Image (tube, grey):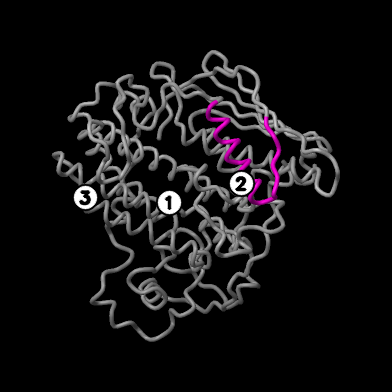
Amino acid sequence: MSSSIAMLGTSGVCDASMHAQATRDDARSSVFGRHCALGTHQPFPDQQTKSFKETKPCRESELYKDPDAHSKPDSRKETEPSFYSEEVDRFAALDQQPVTLHHLLETCAPPLTRSKLLANAQFLARERPVRYAKRVKLFQRLPYIVNLNPHIHNVYQAYYANFIESQGFSRVENMEDEHKFISMLARQSKLLLDIMPQIARGFYECRHYFRPDDRRRFLDQLIKMRIGLRLLTSQHIALYDQFHAKTTVSAPTKHAVLADPTHRHQGIIDNQLHVTDMVHICAQSVQAMCDMTFGDSPSFIVDGQTDVVFRYIPSHLDYMLTELLKNAFCASLKSVQDTENEIPPVIITVSKGDSRVAIRVRDQGGGIPSQIHDQVFDYSFTTTKHTSFDDPDNVVPSDGSNCVADANVISGLGFGLPMTKIYAEYFGGMLNIVSLEGYGCDAFLELPSIKLNRTPTIQI
């Protein structure tokens, strides 16, 4: 386990100089123009000129000045719309409508009717611009120097573009509107598919300009917001596909769909998720990754209550299992590196209590060194010497949406365990790592079975 978790390789952070005070309008005009101005919506404070290397880590509230803001006025300011639009501020000031998991389950309860589908679409059309606006403001509150990073800026632009498009699609009154709405949802989801590797790279490059606690708070908030909106969006797309299950292919999303007379699936929720089947799928996928990366892979054993079935979201369990198995398989392989010893197997134990499912992933990979044990849930922490950041072409989508298909990098981003913990806790579960230094690790994943009458009122 320890060998697959953390310390990233070095990547350069651009060196530049910072100059004196500037007005907000000049700052956004001269640096980014109409499409990419970033920073805070408040005036920049006075700050003495210094190089980036001399800049101390700053809190979220600390702002940096625009290096070109003192240059000549931009004549386009009167003709081009302001990037800091009042619409973003207006939507960001609105409260998110609380959506509980209980309400989500009631919405998708059979029978799925046209009126239910349209009502859900109308809610989502109203809610998406509010949630995107809050995400845009989250980025605008970052220190100015962090927003200059091209990877973080690309993600910001994607969120801003989705806000603009969502804002213009506020009403879904009939099935023709719904068809267009679904096309927009599929297009926007694709645009945001690979943002987490960009976020990981960007924050790694800006690590000297961010206090660890500030970075963790920002990323925790961003990832939770992302999970919530992706859950609502994916649920609606799945309901649309299931509503049109009489056809072979759903045209807007290009997803093949089959009739489900047993109502096993309610949107993206699987009412009869076989844990052992999912474990085998994920373990075999990680074995294939190890074979491609290291030329060998450990065997695995599944024991315990192997017939456990519960109600959960398959893509979430898929992501969590794959990340935990990647750590265990990687550590097991590296524990016998340069020796004649056989690779110890990874043991996955499954059990179920009254309303919760537990999965233990056990390896004999040497455990986690005591000096880094407290860092395993820190973002961008990895012991992998050659990381994905060392090779600009080796960054792949891996955000939990379809990790078996996308996670063809075995380690190196340093986001796997922290994101797994957030996914586990999202519906009231938990993730714990117990290390026996010199022997191996046990990762304990505990998840609640999603039930209509017993699910806590978790807001999405």
Say what secondary structure mark 3 lies in: loop
Asked whether disc 2 touches disc 3, contact meaning CB atoms under 8 Å apart, the reply is no
Q: Amino acid at mark 2?
A: Met
Q: Which residue is mark 2?
A: 289
Asked whether disc 3 touches disc 1, contact meaning CB atoms under 8 Å apart, the reply is no
Q: Earlier in the sequence, mark 2 or mark 1?
A: 1
The residue at the far right in this view is 340
Q: Nearer the viewer, mark 3 or mark 1?
A: 1
| Residue 281 inside the magenta-drawn segment | yes
Q: Which residue is mark 1?
A: 193
Q: State the residue at coordinates (24%, 21%).
A: 111
Numbered range of the magenta stretch? 277-300
The local crowd at label 1, few if under 14, some if 14 to 19, many if 20 or more residues have their Cα within 10 Å, is some
Task: Indicate which disc residue 169 carries.
Answer: 3
The foreground one among 135 and 22 is 135
Q: Position of residue 29 (x, y in %)?
A: 36, 75
Q: Position of residue 146 (x, y in %)?
A: 52, 64
> Residue 110: which quarter of the image?
top left
Magenta-drawn stretch, dominant element (helix, strand or loop): helix
- State the separation of the CA atoms marked 2 and 3: 41 Å
Q: Nearer the viewer, mark 2 or mark 1?
A: 2
The local crowd at label 2, few if under 14, some if 14 to 19, many if 20 or more residues have their Cα within 10 Å, is many
**Residue 295 placement, left or right of 246:** right
Q: Amino acid at mark 3?
A: Phe
Q: State the residue at coordinates (39%, 16%).
A: 453
The foreground one among 165 and 334 is 334
Q: Amino acid at mark 1?
A: Leu
Q: Nearer the viewer, mark 2 or mark 3?
A: 2
Quarter placement of the C terminus: top left
Say what secondary structure mark 1 lies in: loop
Q: Position of residue 177 (x, y in %)?
A: 16, 44
- State the separation of the CA atoms marked 3 and 1: 21 Å
